[in-house]
Amino acid sequence: MGDEPRDVVVLGAGIAGTALASHLARRSLRVTVVDPRTPAAGASGRAAGIVTEQLWNEWDVAVTRESRAEYLELAKGDPETFLEAPFVRLTVNPTIAEALGHAVVRLRGWGVPVESVDADRLLDWFPAGHFAGLRGAIASRSDACVTPSTITTLYLDDARRHGAEVAFGAPVPVPEFRDRRWSVRSGPAVIRARALVVAAGAWSKSLLVGLGHPLPLTPYRTQAAVLRPPTGSTKGPAASFHDLDTDVYARPESNGRILAGDGTEWFETDPERFVAGADASFLAHLAEALGTWFPEWGGSDVVGAWAGVCTATLDRRPCIGPVDPARSLYSITGFNGFGVMRAGGAARRLAELIAAPDSATAAAALEPVLPARFGGRAPVFSPIPGFTLEGGEAPRF
Ligand SMILES: Cc1cc2nc3c(=O)[nH]c(=O)nc-3n(C[C@H](O)[C@H](O)[C@H](O)COP(=O)(O)OP(=O)(O)OC[C@H]3O[C@@H](n4cnc5c(N)ncnc54)[C@H](O)[C@@H]3O)c2cc1C
């Protein structure tokens, strides 16, 4: 690493930090990514990778569409990295079925190709399914599943090809603002830069407190598992799904396996001290919930199971943009468990603002997620996590 001052230092090499580095470097900004661990060592290396436009507002939909296009291009046709897979939401509950009908109207108004589907249609995607009790299901066909750790690495490769520098596995960086620029010390190395970006996932909360700019962020633990349905069972699924009754979701994996999750805890976790393995109660819940729709999946082998830490915000929207404009301090965090699907588009928008800090257009492209909306307030709060059908601070489903 050279001693030349940089334009931007990005703290964190998850999918958000590396996507940002790629977008900044492509704009000819001199960027260095610093991470005391390795790329995708945080939530990005533990995520399921579902990318769906069944989201909560028009901004989310637009940003996810941008991300999807970027991931498709990065993957260069590798189905292990990017797999086209419709996303289905389903229920046995008539009240939720009614809400699904409203969601179709709302999502179509935002240009999402989503429709109600019946049990016969579901069997095309899920040959192992038993949908007798189905009361409602909707599907969006243009969705996908990605491998988040691979996308993170691909962004990083792209950033380096465009001149970005990296410092990984080094002592925890200590940023300081003096003489009108940032100075980031990591062991004996010091990197100087005009702007600093906190892209440190669940660690962002404590980093921002240390920088004197707390945001309302709560790290929380969530779990996932790769399952292998019993040998000789029917073909694996061709779509992802979210069961609104149990909150369990699953996506197709290679060789007929599935990656399923939920096991979300509704209280704060310390990303330095969380339990990285999965709980027995989570695996029992998965088996029971999956067995409702897919009786043979209830007896699946557990190939691997783990937990990761996500970051909730007070209003369930991310915090992306200037945190302290006078000192060129920015954040890209608080994805509430949905950072893979939004990272690429969100990073592109933030890179545009960092490259042109006075641009009203660049700021407007981040308007719903600007950290300034909290006015410096950072109250303690419990996370309301989950793949909810409805948006807002208190979704019913
Ligand atoms: C089980 C599970 C399933 C998920 N499924 C999905 C899904 O299907 N779809 C979806 O969109 N999202 C999903 N997510 C959420 C998604 O993983 C996150 O929203 C996303 O990965 C956040 O990326 P990030 O780059 O902000 O943070 P992270 O990936 O956590 O990266 C943060 C990085 O910051 C580094 N860091 C820490 N401290 C410092 C410091 N002081 N200085 C510099 N760097 C530091 C860490 O080492 C880490 O590498 C899931 C998450 C989990 C755990």
Image (spheres, grey):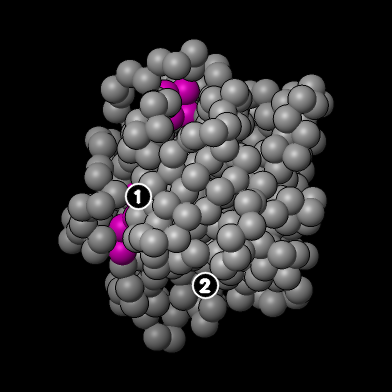
Q: Nearer the viewer, mark 2 or mark 1?
A: 1
Instruction: Tell whether label 1 touches label 2 (CB within 8 Å).
Output: no
Q: Main secondary structure of the magenta part?
A: strand
Q: Label 1 neighbourhood size at 10 Å, few (<14), some (14-19), many (20+)?
A: many
Where residue 147 sits: x, y (%)? 56, 67
Quarter of the image where the N terminus is located: bottom right
Magenta-tinted stretch: 306-316
Task: Identify the residue at image location x=62%, y=40%.
Answer: 194
Kindly identify which numbered label has been placed on residue 309.
1
Gap in angstroms between the C-alphas marked 2 and 1: 22 Å
Quarter of the image where the C terminus is located: top left
Kindly identify which numbered label has been placed on residue 253.
2
Task: Identify the residue at image location x=52%, y=53%.
Answer: 191
Where residue 252 sits: x, y (%)? 54, 68
Horizontal side of 40 relative to 161 (left or right) equals: left
Q: Nearer the viewer, residue 88 or 274?
A: 274
Where residue 373 sits: x, y (%)? 55, 17
Q: Nearer the viewer, residue 192 or 81?
A: 192
Q: Is residue 361 magenta?
A: no
| Above-or-below relation of 392 to 103 | above
Amino acid type assigned to the residue bearing label 1 in the image: Val
Amino acid type assigned to the residue bearing label 2 in the image: Glu
SS at badge 2 = loop
Whether the residue under disc 1 has CB within 8 Å of ligand 1: yes
